[in-house]
Amino acid sequence: MALNLKYSGEGKDMTFEELEAFVKQAKASGVQNDRNVYAELSTSGKIKELSVKVDDGD
């Protein structure tokens, strides 16, 4: 079963500090550097939510 790491901004949109926390958590979880990061954006183009696969479920 593949594991995903999902992170949302505390408010409506994600701040730079929250983006940094997402990257730190992903690295601590063992996310490989070649993984794609998926984002949900607000209508104004700001990041609302990020997700990344931690593993392929092997």
Image: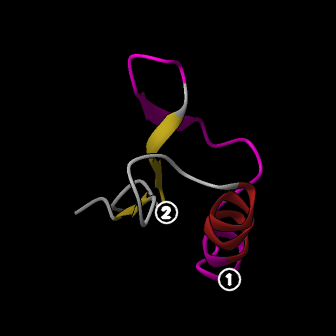
How far is the residue under mark 2 from the one under mark 1? 10 Å
Residue 29 at x, y = what percent? 58, 79
Q: Residue at x 49, y 63 (%)?
A: 54
User: Foreground residue, 2 or 47?
Assistant: 47
Identify the residue under disc 1: 28
User: Which image quadrant is residue 30 in?
Assistant: bottom right
Q: Position of residue 32 (x, y in %)?
A: 69, 57
Q: Is residue 42 above or below residue 20?
A: above
Label whose residue precedes the other's in the sequence (2 or 1): 1
User: 36 or 23: nearer the eye?
Assistant: 23
- Identify which residue is drawn at 42% across, 67% down: 10
For this view, does 54 lie left or right of residue 32?
A: left
The residue lying furthest to the left in this view is 1
Asked if the stretch drawn in magenta spans residue 36, the answer is yes
Amino acid type of the residue tagged 2 in the rendering: Val
Q: Residue furthest bottom?
A: 28
Q: As shown in the figure, which amino acid type bears the numbered disc 1?
A: Ala
2 shown above or below 21: above
Pick the front one: 49 or 58: 49
Determine whether the residue tagged by mark 1 lies in a helix, strand or loop: helix
Query: What residue is drawn where x is 48% and y is 46%?
Result: 13
Give 9 or 36, whichever is nearer the viewer: 9
User: Which residue corresponds to mark 2?
Assistant: 54
Give the number of callouts: 2
What color scheme is it?
A: secondary structure
The answer to whether 42 is drawn above or below residue 47 in the figure is above
What residue span does the magenta drawing correspond to?
25-45
Task: Name the element at disc 2.
Answer: loop
- Asked if the residue at tag 1 contacts the one at tag 2, i.e. Cβ–Cβ closer than 8 Å, the answer is no
